[in-house]
Amino acid sequence: MNRDALQSALLQDSSASAHAAGVELEEGADFKVFLHKTVSALELWDIWSWRHEVMLETGVTPRPGLSEAVTRLQAAGTARVYMATVTGSQRRFLLFLSEDLIRCVACW
């Protein structure tokens, strides 16, 4: 997956985190798409919803967009997703891309 394709996928997501990740990509941020294996969005929801809950219970402030991303992972159900990262000058983003790699399912 090249930079342009990843930016196009991020444009399919209207969240603030996806927009910020797209800006970082435009500015030359490093990115990596893990194409070796897909995973069920519901499995990731199970993991990340628990982590989000623990953060809130222990007083840790989650990164912006985590709550929305958890909701989007749940909504995606059993759809298979690829994981990706965008590492920019301001922060690192975690992305979940549709199996066909044309849209971002969740980002924070």
Image (cartoon, grey):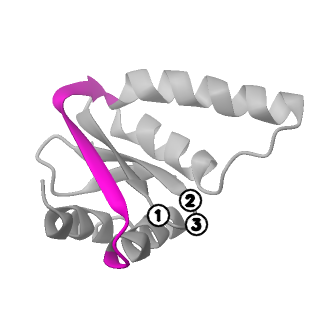
**Residue drawn at (35%, 31%) of the image:** 41
Q: Nearer the viewer, residue 1 or 55?
A: 1
Q: Secondary structure at mark 2?
A: loop
Q: Quadrant of residue 80?
A: top left
**Residue drawn at (28%, 67%) of the image:** 12
- Which amino acid is tagged 1? Gly
Are dots 3 and 1 in contact, CB under 8 Å? yes
**81 shown above or below 32:** above
Image x and y of residue 68, in percent: 56, 51
- Looking at the rendering, the stretch of residues picked out in magenta corresponds to 26-40
Image x and y of residue 99, in percent: 16, 40
State how far apart marks 2 and 1 are (Cα).
5 Å
Give the class, few, some or many, for how many residues have Cα within 10 Å of label 2's Cα (few <14, many ≥20). few
Tag 3 residue:
90
Image x and y of residue 19, in percent: 44, 72
Are dots 2 and 1 in contact, CB under 8 Å? yes
Q: Nearer the viewer, residue 55 or 85?
A: 85
Tag 1 residue:
88
